[in-house]
C-alpha cells in the first residue's frame, strides 16, 4: 500500500502527500492502467487482515507516510 500511495503522490501536481486524499487513491485503484503491476486484491486484503475499512487503511498509510515525508522527499 505504501508504494501505491507514493505512486499516487508522484502524479499529483506538486508531488506532495498533502494533496493525496483517500478518494484519489481509491480512484487510482480503479484505473487498471495506473501502476498496473500492483495487485489490487492484495491492497484490499491488507485492510481486511487489519480489520479496518479500506478507506481508513488508506488514510492511516497516508498519515504514516507524512511522518517520514522528508526522508521520502515528498
Image (spheres, helix red, strand yellow):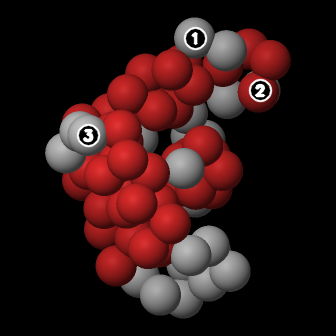
Residue at label 2? 73
Pinpoint residue 59: horizontal percent, then vertical percent: 32, 33
Q: Nearer the viewer, mark 2 or mark 1?
A: 1
Q: Residue at x 58, y 56 (%)?
A: 4
Earlier sequence position, callout 3 versus callout 2: 3
Residue 47 relative to residue 12: left or right: left
- Say if residue 55 shows up in the picture: no
Image quadrant in which you'd find residue 72:
top right
Quadrant, the C terminus? top right
Q: Nearer the viewer, mark 1 or mark 3?
A: 3
The count of marks equals 3
Pinpoint residue 10: horizontal percent, then vertical percent: 64, 51
- Say if residue 60 shows up in the picture: yes
Question: Looking at the image, do the residues carrying marks 1 and 3 touch, with CB atoms under 8 Å apart?
Answer: no
Separation of residues labelled 2 and 1 (CA atoms): 12 Å
Which element type, helix, strand or loop, lies under badge 1? loop
Pinpoint residue 30: horizontal percent, then vertical percent: 34, 79
Residue 44 drawn above or below residue 30: above
Residue 13 relative to residue 52: left or right: right
Residue at label 1? 67
Pinpoint residue 41: horizontal percent, then vertical percent: 44, 73
Earlier sequence position, callout 1 versus callout 3: 3
Separation of residues labelled 3 and 2 (CA atoms): 30 Å
Q: Residue at x 62, y 83 (%)?
A: 36
Residue at label 3? 51
Amino acid at each position: 500500500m505504501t508504494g501505491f500511495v507514493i505512486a499516487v503522490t508522484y502524479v499529483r501536481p506538486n508531488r506532495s502527500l498533502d494533496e493525496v486524499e483517500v478518494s484519489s487513491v481509491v480512484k487510482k485503484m480503479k484505473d487498471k492502467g495506473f501502476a498496473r503491476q500492483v495487485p489490487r486484491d492484495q491492497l484490499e486484503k491488507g485492510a481486511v487482515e487489519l480489520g479496518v475499512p479500506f478507506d481508513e487503511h488508506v488514510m492511516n498509510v497516508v498519515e504514516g507516510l507524512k511522518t517520514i515525508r522528508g526522508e521520502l522527499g515528498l
